[in-house]
Amino acid sequence: MEHVKCECGHVNPHGTAFCESCGKPLADLGEKLILDMRYEGSARRSQTYKKTMIDQIWAFFSSVKVGVALIVITLIASAIGTIFPQQMYIPPNVDPAEYYKQQYGWAGKLYYELGFNNLYGSWWYILLIALIGVSLVICSLDRVVPLYRALKRQGVKRHPRFLERQRLFGVSHVSDLDKTMAVLKERLAARRYHVREEDGHLLAEKGRFSRWGPYVNHIGLIIFLIGAMLRSVPGMYIDRVMWIPEGETKEIPGTNGRYFLKSEKFIFETYEKGKDNEVFNAAIDRVGNGMIAKNYQTNVVLYKRVGPVIPGAKPKLEKVKEYPIRVNEPLEFDHYALYQVDFRLNEPKAMSFQLADKQSGETFGTVTVDLYDPKESYNLGHGYRVELLSYFPDFEFDEDGNPSTKSRVPNNPAFVFKMYAPDRPKGEVSFVAIRQTIEPFGNNKYKMAFAGLQTRNVSGLTVRRDFTLWILGVGGAIFMIGLIQGMYWNHRRIWVQRVNGELWIAAHTNKNWFGLKNELRRLLDGTGVMMPADQLENDKKAGQGGQVHGHGTA
Amino acid sequence: MDMAQLSSTLLYIAFVLYLIGTFFFGGAIRDKRKERQEKDRWSQLGISVTIIGFLAQVGYFVTRWIAAGHAPVSNLFEFTTFFGMMLVAAFIIIYFIYRLSVLGLFALPVALLVIAYASMFPREISPLIPALQSDWLHIHVTTAAAGEAILAISFVAGLIYLIRVVDQSKPSKRTFWLEVVMFCLITTLGFVIVSTAFGLSGYEAKFTWVDKNKQTVEVIYDMPALVGPHKGELMKESAGRMEPLVEMPAIINARKLNTVIWSLIAGTALYIMLRLLLRKRVAAALKPLVKNVNLDLTDEISYRAVAIGFPVFTLGALIFAMIWAQIAWTRFWGWDPKEVWALITWLFYAAFLHLRLSKGWHGEKSAWLAVIGFAIIMFNLVAVNLVIAGLHSYAGT
Ligand code: HEM
């Protein structure tokens, strides 16, 4: 590899635009008046090597043009995904192909056929994000190393051609150079500049750390993206649904039988006029009294299993804590979180019947059938007894006309009872469903009279465990730090040199030139040194026929 | 006077003060004697009035918070008003950095439009549904709005830049698009005017119509129906109200489309009137106001606003949003339209920064980008709430 030796003696890597140490332009800079200071003219791999395939891939991904193109494509794709709802937001029990066509006509059909119904999970969308990630890594590496080198090796004394090609540049004649330099040095130090002196020349610098801001924020982004990708690794991420009725204790899914949950009560409240803050009355009126939800809450008890898991045996449980789970207030334990997400009100739980004499109406006791766990036999004493022969939780007649059940959910319970009484020792059979009774073997003396329905509320909870969250958190935090570092600070440098008995000043900042000019103005005030001219502005003025009302050129 | 009443009054006062402030800043431009050294009376008056107005609006915010028991950022009216307030705050901050009075002349009208627009939505104090009952509501929404407002200052500066720099001597693509921006601003005013006018007249027409699930439902129009709902029929109590000229298919929300059409009609009428009055393009008419503006400084302000606003926006609209979503909705990200549009906004400004930094997109190009960025923010604020319904769309408004 060839190196380029500058006349100041510094040896620069091949591809350097201007000397790392003294700033003398090494390459032909053409007509350009002002040096491109972005990477201190340092040699970037992508700009220097273009031979092998790897060089070319490297150059491709380190190009900001490519990076911006990727960002813009992702942006447009993301926007397309919001035209119609994504599949996860349509009702779960419909055929998506039908749904999009029916709801949105031909446009919906096309949307579905192009796969936009699952746009954010599509391979090409994920590939786009991955490419942005690759681009981030390569472009950062491509720049940060040479930039670090160049900033570390910069010399205090700069070549005059470096100075005169800075955007802010001025030459002054002062009567007492030494004294002026001393005053400037003092003032610069007072303004918290880090001042270095060499052979009577000054380099004042501040905020250099802000130059690392973009790289820090890119690292944060990469960490975030890695975290997001890790979610698809098994075990990193658990997302389960749990329906739990009031009064029941259930194993919490996803915990491998280690945790159990009991629901004490589900509470649903709405805002009501008279009870809530009066200022809400107008809003409540508009939507309807009792129509605005106020609270969804499940009071639960969390249990932990003690001892080993023995199949078939009832687990031994130890109470961990009681907690009201509400929206925005999940129950957290051992990296898990349980969220209140859904509910079903007033689900049938048990049905009661009275054994009655059809004619006299006299009753002989009450039978309560648990719709989820019915007993087979109910003894009412004094010789009265009821047996449950069959139970159909979700009753229907099947194709052959026989009673059967659609599901195990008691949506439409039906029962076949056998009723025993002292005067009916062989028993009478009765088929009882909602609003109908069939007596298959002729007329009975007794009947099972409906005596009430017990209901209960069921809570829908989501169980989550996400081991990627802390990675995302770290990534996000680093991103913010880098962002603030790069955006709220800037890197300012002021060179003050003696050249042929004149005082030369040049200044550079990576952003906020307005602030730098103000600072210079204050710095030079009363020293007799001329305010450096903004060469970029002068340049433009010439181009625009002097229309621009200059400022900053005192 | 009770708190809620006091709160409304304070908002009204703030609105009027911003209006007065605009005129003072206008005076600062016209003041020919203006020299750098000399103290500029008009600007001083302008910024003082603006600050008092801002304090009045903070008063509105605080009293409404006390009345409701929660931060007033929970429905479209409150959020948009808050955005207007942050816009003024961002302007005040940038003003004290750069002391550019022309910025006030453009920033305040934008804030006024935003607040007027907000006031067209139901203004009652609404109770919080369970998902919103969280401190993260205040934290997330306020920071996101603050970020968007600072980014909006970049638009204001960009607009000034464009008005100053676009050559109005002959029509071109640039003059056309600049007029489009003007037209959009004027149409917002059109919306405010028609809403207020029909609101004051108490217009109401009830229709029954058949929705896309073939259900017959009712809808109340508060503007005469130019476009009617699917199989819409005027109900008895609205007999004699205007019959729709055209009927919409079921998947289109005809009531909202009707409002949009009325706004466009009013906006177009206003725009044509202005053109006839001014006898030149609106942007051309504004050009004298900015003729003394320093282009480089305006460009820098536009960029600086993005530099300051981007981190705030990231924190509020993405990071805080994700934290809250994780707590309230069990997942930090769910590709809800509002979330996606926040991501789009963020990607857009990232592209803006990169283009500026490495492709040297300064000046006019950068100014156009600032305009597009603001359009995206407004799209998220207006269209995503009203058109694309998602988890975030404030219930029913
Ligand atoms: C969405 C993703 C990205 C975000 C949010 C982001 C953010 C940023 C920010 C805030 C800056 C500082 C800008 C300024 O100071 O004005 C920056 C600089 C930069 N970014 Fe990115 N970036 C992203 C993606 C990329 C990609 C894909 C590339 C690769 C081509 C890239 C390359 C750069 C470069 C080269 C710089 C300038 C560094 C310097 O000059 O010191 N960025 N980025």
Image (tube, coloured by chain):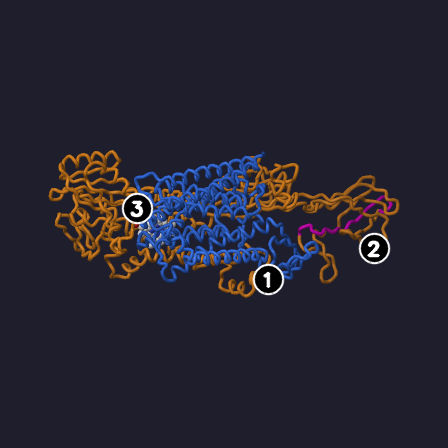
Chain colours: A orange, B blue
> Which residue is at the front of the view, B310 or B234?
B234
Give the image location of residue A41, x and y in percent.
22, 51
Mark 3 within 8 Å of ligand 1, using the beta carbon: yes
Gap between marks 1 and 3, in whole Å? Answer: 53 Å
Q: In the rendered structure, which segment of residues is drawn in magenta?
A: A408-424
Q: Give residue A351's quadrant in the image.
A: top right
Report the disc number at residue A511. 3
Residue indicated by mark 2:
A441
Label for residue B248?
Answer: 1
In this rendering, the count of numbered labels is 3
For the residues beneath circles 2 and 3, the answer to whether they share a chain is yes
Q: Is there any visible trace of residue B239 in the rendered image? A: yes
Q: Where is residue B283 in the image (x, y as percent from the top left)?
A: 41, 55
The local crowd at label 3, few if under 14, some if 14 to 19, many if 20 or more residues have their Cα within 10 Å, is: many
- Circle 2 marks a residue in which chain? A
Q: Disc 3 is attached to a residue of which chain? A: A
Q: What residue type is labelled 3?
A: Lys
